[in-house]
Image (spheres, helix red, strand yellow):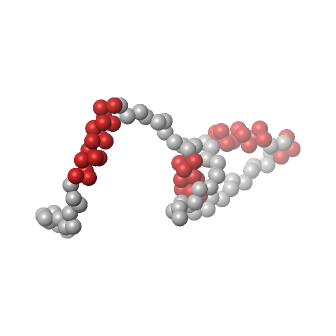
Amino acid sequence: RPVVQQVQTPMPQPAATAATSTQVAQPASTSTQAAAPAEEAFGDVTRGLLAAQADGRRAGAMLPVLGPVSTAAWNRYLESFSHPIPEYLQKRVETKSTN
């Protein structure tokens, strides 16, 4: 079951772009009336950003991994299976309390 529900929501436009697009979209008779801004509910921005990340609208460019780097990472990954996972740690980490 997914933790985040994927929704299709448009990303908010910058104020200057939004103002010019509403002026162009409005008929001449209603241009004197100011459009009431939509009230944002709690979490709307977060849901919009998560949806944009999930569907790729705000995804970064794919970066290639060079051969030697990829080979070293793969070898480290494979080597990690040669060591058993300890049931407990032999040494305790000591911290100094600053309170």
Drawn side of residue 80 relative to residue 91, left or right: right
Which residue occupies 87% across, 44% down? 29
Q: Position of residue 33 (x, y in %)?
A: 79, 49
Q: Position of residue 12 (x, y in %)?
A: 62, 47
- Seen in the picture, residue 32 relative to 93 is either above or below; the reply is above
Where is residue 27 drawn, in percent x and y?
Answer: 84, 42
**Residue 96 can be seen, yes or no:** no
Task: Please state which of residues 87 and 44 is positioned toward the viewer in this rendering.
Answer: 87
Q: Nearer the viewer, residue 68 or 58?
A: 68
Q: For this view, does 67 lie left or right of residue 30?
A: left
Coordinates of residue 53 in the picture (x, y in percent): 53, 48
* Count of numbered labels shown in the rendering: 0
Residue, far top: 67
Residue shown at the point (83%, 46%) measured from the top left: 30
The residue at 37%/34% (across/down) is 65
- Residue at the location (75% across, 49% down)? 34
Given the current orientation, which residue lies at the most extreme front position?
82
Left/right of residue 14 with respect to residue 83 in the rendered view: right
- The answer, for residue 83, to whether it is visible in the render is yes
Q: Toward which corner of the image does residue 58 lie, by quadrant?
A: top right
Looking at the rendering, which quadrant does residue 70 occupy?
top left
Quadrant location, the C terminus: bottom left
- Could you say which is closer to the camera, residue 37 or residue 49? 49
